[in-house]
Amino acid sequence: MKKLNKYIGACLLAIALSSCHKDLDLKPTNDVTADIAYKDFKGYTSSFARLYGSLTLTSTSGPNNTDLGGLDAGTSDFLRLFWNAQELTTDEAACAWLNDPGISGLDYLNFDDSNPMLRGLYTRCVYSATLVNEFLRESTDAKLAERGISDADKKEIAYYRAEARFLRAYNYWVLLDLFGNPPFVTEETSVGKVSPPQIKRPELFAYVEKELLEVAGQLKGAKQNVYGRVDQVAAWGLLARLYLNAEIYLGAGNKKYTEAITYSEKVLNSGYSLGTNYRELFYADNDVNNPEFIFYLPYDGTKTQSKGGTTYLINAAIDATMNPTSFGVPGGGWAGNRTRDNIATIFGDYSGATDKRAMFHLNTSVKIEDIAVYKQGLAVTKFRNVNKDGKTAPPAAEGFVASVDFPLIRLAEMNLIYAEATLRGGSGGNVAKALDYVNKLRVRAYGNNSGNLANLSLDDVLNERVKELYWEGFRRSDLIRYGKFTGDNYLWPFKGGVLAGQAVPAYRTLFPLPASDIIANSNLVQNPGYN
């Protein structure tokens, strides 16, 4: 089976056990005491599934609800909020829905500490980490012995624990990258009403690094886990990403490009491989024979319903004039997101005739002169809720819910990490090999070697990251690493709120901690620039 069950807190992980359909009557773990929720192996599996579910669903009680107090379902989906923060703040995307709370702050790069979308993302990540902490407290050797869990089940729960720690490390990486200095809790933190302490960015970097290094040896081997669950390669991949950005997280001079080379190459040599067809990576049946996705969010058009995830990415990118049925969402087409002018320039030929990664639709103009007009800017047709044959589509609840899985880590990123880290001076890297890794992506994109580069520069790598990874949630972090996110040395339409673009202050490389959390937790100090 593919996908996670809709009521993830109440049923077994559909991708883990074939008997999931027999256990739909389990109660959500937040409605019962720990002794009942974890009374047997089924209870542990159900609670474990909830950890993955926190990244794909808004609630354990249905698509129009949220597990996050004080927020509505629309501002509590992880992918929608993460994507908005990483893409709408850059040249890769702009949203026409300026009347939606929080959108203009992201579009114009002038967000503040009351932005509801930033608050939702921050809260989702903290909540997900908290779920992991609870699971780890309840799955110690002592607890398992007390509840009479068999030795065979203990062995599987040990893998659950390693995966849980990876998921927590991922959530803390998001907080590290976007917010810098969040509240910090682990399973060792006392449970109660005491406000959690704040952790500083360098210390959080060290924690995430330590966790990933430890769990890499405890997770299942490469490609040995069931669909939708991570293996040790995911830990290596996130380590490579962490090390590539070390100077941003730790300060100038704190380079870890050698480590980025080491771990990206471990991934590249792990047995994962590039898919043969780039476009098919983003179709509805991308769970079938996909050798490239390492860590991903499974979605199902009937079982994981929300207006977030890839449902959001597909529907917000098209309108009714673009034949939503051809995108597998006959009742969809929300006319919101598109690219800004710079992306067409980076691609050059954006028709897809040469570089097949260029998947765009020209509405009325490439240029955006009024950000509230959806028809201005290239529509992105990268994600489609249709199967690889291009003719059939999976069931879509309400006519618009998608079944396209979304990659959080895929192999192609490692090609580009190796290349960039090598050009930035990491030890052990080979420039010829770096060029070859980049050209492997271009051969797939062009269908032959006609697009191959003869030489490679850092700017080439940055542009290749756009072409390979656009709309996958990387652009903000990439521009920050290249020194182009703030300031005025790189502009895009409406950067800083004006058509021509203008400089924004350097403190905006970090998002503010939500004002509501600052008020509620006296241990927190706001990030500079937002007081």
Image (tube, rainbow, N blue to C red):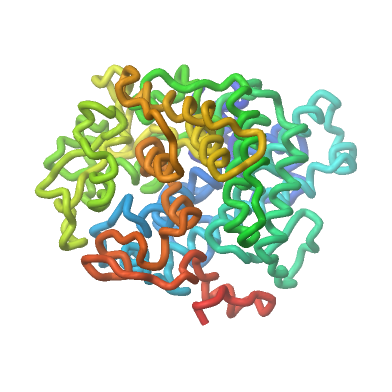
- Please report the residue visible at 64 percent of the width from the left and 30 percent of the height from the top: 233
| Observer able to see residue 47 | no
- Please report the residue visible at 81 percent of the width from the left and 23 percent of the height from the top: 152
Outermost residue to the bottom? 531
Instruction: Give the x, y percent position of residue 503.
Output: 35, 70
Is the residue 141 above or below the residue 273 in the image? below
- Please report the residue visible at 25 percent of the width from the left and 61 percent of the height from the top: 493
Relative placement, left or right, of 441 versus 155 is left
Instruction: Give the x, y percent position of residue 531.
Output: 52, 82
Is the residue 285 above or below the residue 187 in the image? above
| Observer able to see residue 68 | yes
Quarter of the image for residue 402 reads: top left
Relative placement, left or right, of 333 versus 457 is left
Q: Nearer the viewer, residue 356 or 96?
A: 356
Quarter of the image for residue 123 reads: bottom right
Relative placement, left or right, of 186 versus 106 is right
